[in-house]
Image: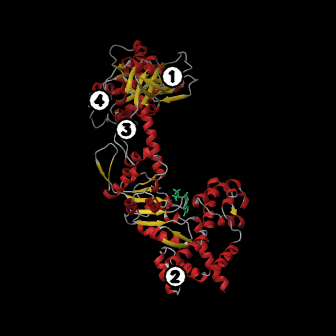
Amino acid sequence: MSVKESLLIVTYMENTLDTFFEQLNEIGLQEIFDIDACTIENLDYSIIKRYSLLLISSNIVYKMVKPYLDDKTPYLITRRTINYAKIRDLLEIPKGTKAYLVSDLKQSAEETIGILKEIGIELDLFPFYPDEPVDKEITMAITPGEPQIVPKTITNIFNIGSRLIDISTLVELFNFFHISPFSSKVHLSARFVQSLVELSKELSDEIFRSTLLHKSLESIVQNIDDGVIVYNNDNEIELYNRTAAEYLNLAVNQTKLTIEVIPPSYYRALRNLAVGQENFIDIEGTTFYMRKKRIIVDNQVQSTLVIFRRAEDYQKIEHDYRFKAKQKNLMARYRFDDMKTVSTPMIEMMKIANRLAKSDSTILILGETGTGKEVLAQAIHHASPRKYEPFIGVNFAAISESLMESELFGYESGSFTGARKGGHIGMFEQSHLGSIFLDEIGDASPVIQNRLLRVLQERQIMRVGGDKIIPLDVRVIAATNKDLKKLIEEGNFREDLYYRLNVLPLRLLPLRERKKDIPLLINLFSKEFQEKLGRRPFVFTQEALRVCESYHWPGNVRELRNIVEYVAHISGEKVYKEELPIGADLLNYRIVENKEEELEKIKNDLIEKGFIEEALSMLEYLNRNEVISAGRSAMLIHLNYEGFLLSDHQLRYRQKILSDHELILIERGRSGSRITDKGKSFLDLYEKSKC
Ligand SMILES: Nc1ncnc2c1ncn2[C@@H]1O[C@H](COP(=O)(O)OP(=O)(O)OP(=O)(O)O)[C@@H](O)[C@H]1O
């Protein structure tokens, strides 16, 4: 029976001993030969000769053992490597961080630093071994299994475990004993190698992630419109993007440049700007907006970043932003549900409008200022198949004549002084596929009327200064508070345009003709402002309501809303009539404190004039047909049927009297007349007095 081979491990430190012993066991060597282990301190020199091989942990340990070795005792000095399985935590430490590498010996500390550097741990490492003076600035230590010798002042310690025997030493060991590394008894590629593979995978994943991140960042920087340049503390350019290359005359992708190569005027501007400052700077006739910042990584200034852009571009951005904001404001916000009314003619009109919304026909909205023409236009757009497309509003009374043409139809670049480079898209183009709301159309100039007529006829536009025909698919909703017929008579509005627009007319009643809406709207607006201002609820007193109902409301719903907003600011839980800001102006309007009394007076007047019966018949007829206003011939037929034979002239006279008493509203032209709310109250009163 052959004598079993034996191996003695000799190390300086106890923990190295344990690590080696464990490592050799792990790869199965204890099954092939006896393994003994001993630190240099405990070594019994007399027995050294008994071993087939001495495995010595380092050159220094060898020097200590050497005097006791005879020439025949074979030995192997290990090369060592770090325990890869234990260095994952080091990957998390920011690059460039200062730390001690603490080991029992200077040489092993330096070796470990070398290995860590080799595998890409980019820390600022200083070797530390016992009896070295401590630099208080360093607060972190990394140690391969020797935390006990880390200076006491350091609390942030990374123990990466004792260094292992390197694989080349293991192969030598195998050779010495004539064992194949692939023998079934040993498993060289066991955990030790496995952990190495895992770590290298982790490292490459990390590298892959950071490369990917780096690439994405670079592509972001390359693609932003601002000029970007980064230079380090030695004035070497580390990064610049395409825009910067263009201005600074740099070839794209050139490396190893210093900032001195950039044109002197830019160089001066760049240097003169203080760090942290942003300013407008003129360079060769162009104004730039320039910003300068330090890039600080882990408390250290790494480089300087300068971002610049032509001031003109910012102006354009601002202009576009304003334009967009304006446009957003004009997105259709209102729906039919938001239009509050209890007035029957209004409800009927809205039903018709809702039906018309589904078609593409042009709509003309008639109504005094503030009656809700724009609200109705938005509701129509919202109820139309175009609701997800733009709703663009143009107010002919608000935009100056000189700008109107270019605002409406857009312009090509350079078509007039002040025209922006790249041209400008007009409101008609913007509303393509959606709706355009032509508000206050009665205020459009003859030139604009001309062009509008062509757009409505041809459904195409041409930009100012352009020669390209742009086809349009747009629904036109126009509105006016003016009497277009009268404007035509006066020669201020094109008749052909009127007929193009007046395809489907809708009329919004003034507030004084739908007084029942007043409490409803007051309630609606009170809630709105109560919420907006975060205040307690408030209600109008009966007296205040009466004043509102008697008021003439020249500004209609808008005026009512403004008044509610005003009282929401000043009043308590109750709104008294004295608080209403209409008080002072009321002198101009007739407040009827006692409605019944006034209606009684009208009745007496009509009786006196001898046509109360005819008047009641006329009012009843209009009340039945309140949506469609009745023309004179229809009224004559009705009166005739009721037994009142009147001439056209006689009818006109009666209509005038009823209109003077505000019981009916006579519309110009062929539209005829319609009953007012007062007219309805008069009918009610008369019915009551008969009972
Ligand atoms: N039926 C309604 N329900 C709720 N609010 C309404 C209604 N009608 C109008 N309003 C409100 O009245 C204000 C004026 O409406 P809008 O701007 O549509 O009037 P307009 O007739 O287009 O006025 P102008 O002729 O002066 O342009 C808006 O603030 C709107 O909130």
Evaluate whether residue 294 shows in this view: no
Q: What residue is pinned by disc 4?
A: 2
Q: Is mark 1 within 8 Å of ligand 1?
A: no
Question: CA–CA distance between discs 3 and 2?
Answer: 63 Å
Amino acid type of the residue that numbered disc 1 sits on in the rendered structure: Ala
Q: Is mark 3 within 8 Å of ligand 1?
A: no
Amino acid type of the residue that numbered disc 2 sits on in the rendered structure: Leu
Q: Earlier in the sequence, mark 1 or mark 2?
A: 1
Question: CA–CA distance between discs 1 and 4?
Answer: 84 Å
Evaluate whether residue 174 shows in this view: yes
Question: CA–CA distance between discs 4 and 2?
Answer: 147 Å
Question: CA–CA distance between discs 3 and 1?
Answer: 40 Å
Report x, y in % for residue 287: 44, 27
Q: Nearer the viewer, mark 3 or mark 2?
A: 2
Q: Earlier in the sequence, mark 3 or mark 4?
A: 4
Looking at the rendered image, the quarter that the C terminus falls into is bottom right
- Is 231 situated above or below 573? above
